[in-house]
Image (cartoon, grey):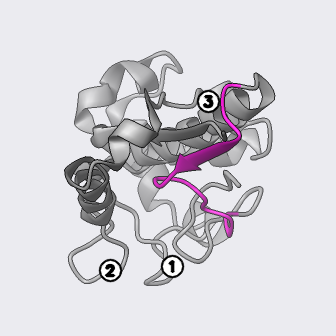
Protein backbone atom coordinates (compact mmCIF):
# COMPACT_ATOMS: atom_id res chain seq x y z
CA UNK A 1 0.00 0.00 0.00
CA UNK A 2 1.28 3.43 -0.91
CA UNK A 3 2.22 5.88 1.82
CA UNK A 4 0.46 9.18 1.13
CA UNK A 5 1.50 12.28 3.06
CA UNK A 6 -0.18 15.66 3.21
CA UNK A 7 1.53 18.88 4.31
CA UNK A 8 -0.29 21.93 5.59
CA UNK A 9 0.48 25.08 7.56
CA UNK A 10 -2.54 27.25 8.26
CA UNK A 11 -0.35 30.35 8.56
CA UNK A 12 -0.15 30.59 4.76
CA UNK A 13 -3.87 31.37 4.60
CA UNK A 14 -3.36 34.68 6.45
CA UNK A 15 -1.98 36.39 3.36
CA UNK A 16 -3.87 38.07 0.56
CA UNK A 17 -2.33 39.08 -2.76
CA UNK A 18 -5.03 41.75 -3.15
CA UNK A 19 -8.82 41.85 -3.06
CA UNK A 20 -9.00 41.82 -6.87
CA UNK A 21 -6.32 39.16 -7.43
CA UNK A 22 -7.60 35.70 -8.48
CA UNK A 23 -5.11 33.90 -6.19
CA UNK A 24 -6.96 33.35 -2.91
CA UNK A 25 -5.09 31.61 -0.10
CA UNK A 26 -8.41 30.83 1.57
CA UNK A 27 -8.78 28.07 -1.03
CA UNK A 28 -5.93 26.24 0.70
CA UNK A 29 -7.90 26.36 3.92
CA UNK A 30 -11.02 25.14 2.13
CA UNK A 31 -9.14 22.14 0.70
CA UNK A 32 -7.77 21.32 4.14
CA UNK A 33 -11.28 21.51 5.58
CA UNK A 34 -12.63 19.20 2.84
CA UNK A 35 -9.86 16.67 3.48
CA UNK A 36 -10.79 16.60 7.15
CA UNK A 37 -14.57 16.69 6.72
CA UNK A 38 -14.64 13.88 4.15
CA UNK A 39 -12.48 11.70 6.38
CA UNK A 40 -9.54 11.66 3.99
CA UNK A 41 -7.22 12.71 6.81
CA UNK A 42 -7.54 9.18 8.24
CA UNK A 43 -6.00 7.83 5.03
CA UNK A 44 -3.13 10.32 4.92
CA UNK A 45 -0.12 10.96 7.08
CA UNK A 46 -0.60 14.59 8.05
CA UNK A 47 2.38 16.91 8.57
CA UNK A 48 2.73 20.55 9.62
CA UNK A 49 5.04 22.19 7.09
CA UNK A 50 7.88 24.51 8.03
CA UNK A 51 9.00 27.89 6.76
CA UNK A 52 11.95 27.79 4.38
CA UNK A 53 15.03 29.68 5.50
CA UNK A 54 16.66 32.45 3.53
CA UNK A 55 19.56 30.08 2.85
CA UNK A 56 17.18 27.47 1.42
CA UNK A 57 15.54 30.06 -0.83
CA UNK A 58 18.99 31.17 -2.01
CA UNK A 59 19.75 27.62 -3.18
CA UNK A 60 17.90 28.65 -6.36
CA UNK A 61 17.16 32.37 -6.09
CA UNK A 62 19.69 35.17 -6.26
CA UNK A 63 20.54 36.45 -2.75
CA UNK A 64 19.74 40.06 -3.74
CA UNK A 65 16.28 38.99 -4.86
CA UNK A 66 15.66 37.20 -1.57
CA UNK A 67 16.92 40.28 0.28
CA UNK A 68 14.41 42.34 -1.69
CA UNK A 69 11.60 39.90 -0.82
CA UNK A 70 12.58 40.27 2.84
CA UNK A 71 11.64 43.95 2.58
CA UNK A 72 8.04 42.74 2.23
CA UNK A 73 8.09 40.96 5.58
CA UNK A 74 5.06 41.24 7.85
CA UNK A 75 5.15 43.45 10.94
CA UNK A 76 4.98 40.27 13.07
CA UNK A 77 8.28 39.07 11.67
CA UNK A 78 10.47 42.05 12.48
CA UNK A 79 13.12 39.76 13.99
CA UNK A 80 13.73 38.16 10.58
CA UNK A 81 14.65 41.47 9.04
CA UNK A 82 16.53 42.68 12.10
CA UNK A 83 18.98 39.79 11.81
CA UNK A 84 20.08 41.34 8.53
CA UNK A 85 20.30 44.78 10.17
CA UNK A 86 17.96 46.47 7.74
CA UNK A 87 16.02 49.33 9.28
CA UNK A 88 12.32 49.96 8.68
CA UNK A 89 13.27 53.05 6.67
CA UNK A 90 15.64 51.01 4.47
CA UNK A 91 12.97 48.33 3.90
CA UNK A 92 10.41 50.92 2.82
CA UNK A 93 12.97 52.57 0.53
CA UNK A 94 13.79 49.15 -0.94
CA UNK A 95 10.09 48.42 -1.61
CA UNK A 96 9.55 51.77 -3.30
CA UNK A 97 12.80 51.84 -5.27
CA UNK A 98 11.88 52.60 -8.87
CA UNK A 99 15.01 50.81 -10.06
CA UNK A 100 14.53 47.60 -8.04
CA UNK A 101 10.81 47.03 -8.65
CA UNK A 102 11.18 46.68 -12.44
CA UNK A 103 14.17 44.36 -12.00
CA UNK A 104 12.39 41.97 -9.62
CA UNK A 105 8.93 42.46 -11.23
CA UNK A 106 7.00 42.99 -8.00
CA UNK A 107 4.18 45.55 -8.24
CA UNK A 108 4.86 45.86 -11.96
CA UNK A 109 1.97 43.70 -13.17
CA UNK A 110 -1.36 42.62 -11.72
CA UNK A 111 0.00 39.06 -11.48
CA UNK A 112 2.58 39.77 -8.78
CA UNK A 113 1.48 42.55 -6.44
CA UNK A 114 3.52 43.44 -3.41
CA UNK A 115 1.68 42.80 -0.15
CA UNK A 116 2.40 42.87 3.55
CA UNK A 117 3.84 39.52 4.54
CA UNK A 118 4.94 38.52 1.03
CA UNK A 119 8.27 37.16 2.25
CA UNK A 120 6.56 35.12 4.96
CA UNK A 121 4.16 33.71 2.37
CA UNK A 122 7.09 32.69 0.16
CA UNK A 123 8.86 31.02 3.08
CA UNK A 124 5.74 28.99 3.91
CA UNK A 125 5.08 27.92 0.31
CA UNK A 126 8.68 26.86 -0.27
CA UNK A 127 9.01 25.27 3.16
CA UNK A 128 6.16 22.89 2.42
CA UNK A 129 7.73 21.86 -0.88
CA UNK A 130 11.12 21.31 0.76
CA UNK A 131 9.43 19.21 3.44
CA UNK A 132 7.65 17.22 0.72
CA UNK A 133 10.93 16.47 -1.05
CA UNK A 134 12.53 15.48 2.27
CA UNK A 135 9.69 13.04 3.02
CA UNK A 136 10.06 11.39 -0.38
CA UNK A 137 13.85 11.17 -0.12
CA UNK A 138 13.59 9.68 3.39
CA UNK A 139 11.10 7.09 2.13
CA UNK A 140 8.38 8.38 4.46
CA UNK A 141 5.96 8.93 1.61
CA UNK A 142 5.41 7.56 -1.87
CA UNK A 143 3.05 10.43 -2.66
CA UNK A 144 3.40 13.75 -0.86
CA UNK A 145 0.91 16.58 -1.31
CA UNK A 146 1.70 20.21 -0.56
CA UNK A 147 -1.42 22.08 -1.69
CA UNK A 148 0.23 25.34 -0.64
CA UNK A 149 3.19 25.02 -3.03
CA UNK A 150 4.04 24.48 -6.65
CA UNK A 151 4.82 28.06 -7.59
CA UNK A 152 6.76 27.15 -10.71
CA UNK A 153 6.82 30.44 -12.64
CA UNK A 154 9.13 32.28 -10.26
CA UNK A 155 12.50 33.00 -11.84
CA UNK A 156 15.92 33.21 -10.22
CA UNK A 157 15.62 36.98 -9.72
CA UNK A 158 12.11 37.80 -10.82
CA UNK A 159 8.48 37.25 -9.90
CA UNK A 160 6.23 35.91 -12.66
CA UNK A 161 2.73 34.49 -13.09
CA UNK A 162 1.52 34.73 -9.45
CA UNK A 163 4.87 33.21 -8.37
CA UNK A 164 7.46 35.09 -6.36
CA UNK A 165 9.62 32.05 -5.72
CA UNK A 166 10.11 28.79 -7.56
CA UNK A 167 9.47 25.85 -5.28
CA UNK A 168 8.70 23.14 -7.80
Q: CA distance from mark 1 to mark 3?
A: 24 Å
Q: Give coordinates of residue 140: x percent, y percent.
A: 67, 25
Figure check: 21 above or below 135: below
Of residue 146 and residue 18, the one placed in the foreground of this image is 146
Residue carrying label 3: 54
Q: Give coordinates of residue 166: x percent, y percent.
A: 68, 56
Figure check: 87 above or below 29: above
Of residue 62 and residue 19, the one placed in the foreground of this image is 19
Residue carrying label 2: 21
Question: Residue shown at 25%/56% (left/top)?
Answer: 38
Question: Residue shown at 61%/31% (left/top)?
Answer: 131
- With 30 as the anchor, is 60 left or right in this view? right
Residue 8: in sight, yes or no? Answer: no
Q: Residues within 10 Å of mark 3 (few under 14, many from 20)?
A: some
Which badge, 1 or 3, is on the more N-terminal residue?
3
Q: Quadrant of the C terminus?
A: bottom right
User: In this picture, which residue range is highlighted in magenta?
Assistant: 140-154
Residue 150 forms part of the magenta stretch: yes
Observer-side mark, 1 or 3, equals 3
Which structural element holds mark 2? Answer: loop
Which structural element holds mark 1? Answer: loop
Q: Quadrant of the N terminus?
A: top right
Residue 144 forms part of the magenta stretch: yes
Figure check: 92 above or below 58: below
Q: CA distance from mark 3 to mark 2?
A: 26 Å
Q: Which mark is residue 108?
A: 1
Of residue 61 and residue 94, the one placed in the foreground of this image is 61
Figure check: 156 above or below 12: below
Q: Give coordinates of residue 44: x percent, y percent.
A: 46, 39
Amino acid sequence: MRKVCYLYNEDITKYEFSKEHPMKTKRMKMVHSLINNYGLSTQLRMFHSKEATSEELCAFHHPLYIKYLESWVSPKAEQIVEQYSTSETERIKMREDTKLNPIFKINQTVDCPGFEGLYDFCRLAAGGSIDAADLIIAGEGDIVINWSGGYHHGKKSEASGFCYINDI
